[in-house]
Image (spheres, grey):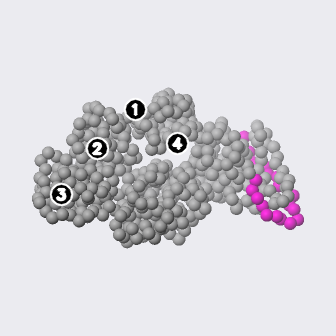
Amino acid sequence: MNINLPIRMCLLVGTLAAVCLTGCQNSVNSNDPIVVTAAPEPETKPELAIVQMTPDGPLFPDNKAIEAGEPIPDYIRKGVEHPVVASLQQRLMDLGFMDNDEPTEYYGDMTVAAVKHFQRQNGLPQDGIVGQNTLNAIMSPDAKYYAVSKGVEGDDIERIQGRLYELGYLATPDLVTGNFGDMTEAAVIKLQQVNGLEQDGKVGQKTVNLLYSDEIKPNMLTYGEKSDVVLACQERLKLLGYMTSEPDGAYGDDTTIAVKQFQARNDLVVDGYLGPSTRIALNSSAAVPNGISLGDQGDAVRRVQELLNKYGYLVAGNITSYYGEVTENAVKEFQRQNGLSADGSVGAMTMNKLTGSNVKKAPAKSSQKKESSGGNNNKNNNNNNSNKGSTSGGGSVIHNSGGVSSLISVAQSKIGCPYVWGAKGANSFDCSGFVYWCLNQVGVRQSYLTSSGWRNVGKYQKITSFGSLQAGDIIVVKGHVGIVAGGGQVIDASSSHGRVVQRSLSSWWANNFICGWRIFG
């Protein structure tokens, strides 16, 4: 049954208040004004509670009951600022039509786009304006989660097709059109088949959640395959300095590590798959060659250390996966002995020499000191002790006294830049693209990760308590990431604001908190 919203939806504490809800005819279109009828005021205004209007929570946000004299606008459209907008945004996020974010009272471009997608799915005029029918449909307990299928057109379809192409389910980039046709339906069915979902050809909640998850299985060259195509990719990866073993056409651990390292340095989603986008970038003249240096950490560093150990430049005890000063000195010695420029960084030339067949072994020398493994040095141990009970080990922090202030300064310089889904800068961003761009601007070599990927990045010191966050930390919440600015503030690319903002770390952030990552010590 369709209902009209009153000026205030509330329960009187200890009293059953009569709130008049008038009916709405089905023939009224989505832009008809919202008719409101208020119950008589009691002589003494009691404390207000909020009526439960949805399965998941109250219609209006906590502590934001609509006050008398602040009626809901007849039409909620771009530019409107009103508490009901926050409720609309939260509901659209819950239903999968907006990226997860702290709701705001401002009705901007991202909310307009989300409302249009909702209207499209529910057979309403796609004007992005919330009239009575649209409002009732969004707030209905029976509202359906975002879903698209054959015949639908839109910018959201183009994004879905782009990901299907990257995962190898759409064969060519010209199929990324924004029009959900037969080829897209076939690609979705194939994705669902490979990943064990119901094969209905529709992109609904389970398929949407799968598209960017770590568990997704691609339809492309991946681990365990052997072919001439894999061989060609390995040869290119070796030429660029990413492969640490001889190309053999078999997609094994070395190839996966090399592909991930290549993706990280070439602004691609780091998934270890040789998908279409990765192969195009790999064969491009603009492909960025490898470079591993002081402060890096991961499997690629371990492979280099193992090779240095093989030729006598590094003792086995220093194979830590962390590129510290001992590894840097070992690389310099290797470069000097093998006729390379001794800069201490492993670029394409050093990697090719290190993985080649004509390598000069290290001369006899005294034993090396123990390599620090990033997060386990004394300075970092002190840092861990100060946050006892709120952090988990294994990650490292970068000891750069100016790092925090530089990161916050860079982030603040982009306040006001528009939010654009998938954008990584320099003048438009989504939430994860903003964090990625800011970190790289201050010299932190961080690959692009989705908000989901930030949950398990593992590279830095993990903060497990919301109350232990400090300025410069990366905060990860459900479906969103930001940069802690200190003083109870956060800087993030906000979909609900439609731009980069600096705002309070409110209860929304605390309630949705997953973890934080300490980048700087």
Q: Amino acid at mark 1?
A: Ala
Mark 4: few/some/many CA within 10 Å (<14, 14-19, 20+) = few
* Viewer-nearest residue: 133 or 361: 361
* Viewer-nearest residue: 223 or 231: 223
In the picture, measured across the screen, residue 111 lies left or right of residue 58, that is left
Q: Nearer the viewer, mark 4 or mark 2?
A: 2
Task: Find disc 3 in the rendering and name its residue.
Answer: 313
Query: Which region is colored magenta?
Result: 29-51
Q: Amino acid at mark 3?
A: Tyr
Q: Earlier in the sequence, mark 2 or mark 3?
A: 2
The percent position of residue 376, horizontal first and vertical second, equals 35, 64
Q: Earlier in the sequence, mark 4 or mark 3?
A: 4
Q: Residue at x 70, y 47 (%)?
A: 54
Q: Is residue 348 visible?
A: no
Task: Find disc 4 in the rendering and name its residue.
Answer: 209
Does 37 appear above or below 137? below
Q: Quadrant of residue 385?
A: bottom left
Q: Name the outermost residue toward the right.
A: 43
Q: CA distance from mark 2 to mark 1?
A: 26 Å
Q: Amino acid at mark 2?
A: Asp
Q: Earlier in the sequence, mark 3 or mark 1?
A: 1
Q: CA distance from mark 4 to mark 1?
A: 22 Å
Q: Earlier in the sequence, mark 2 or mark 1?
A: 1
Task: Find disc 1 in the rendering and name its residue.
Answer: 171
Mark 1: few/some/many CA within 10 Å (<14, 14-19, 20+) = some
Q: CA distance from mark 2 to mark 3?
A: 21 Å
In the picture, measured across the screen, residue 433 lies left or right of residue 373, that is right
Q: Residue at x 61, y 41 (%)?
A: 145
The percent position of residue 310, horizontal first and vertical second, equals 19, 51
Mark 2: few/some/many CA within 10 Å (<14, 14-19, 20+) = some
Q: How many numbered discs?
A: 4
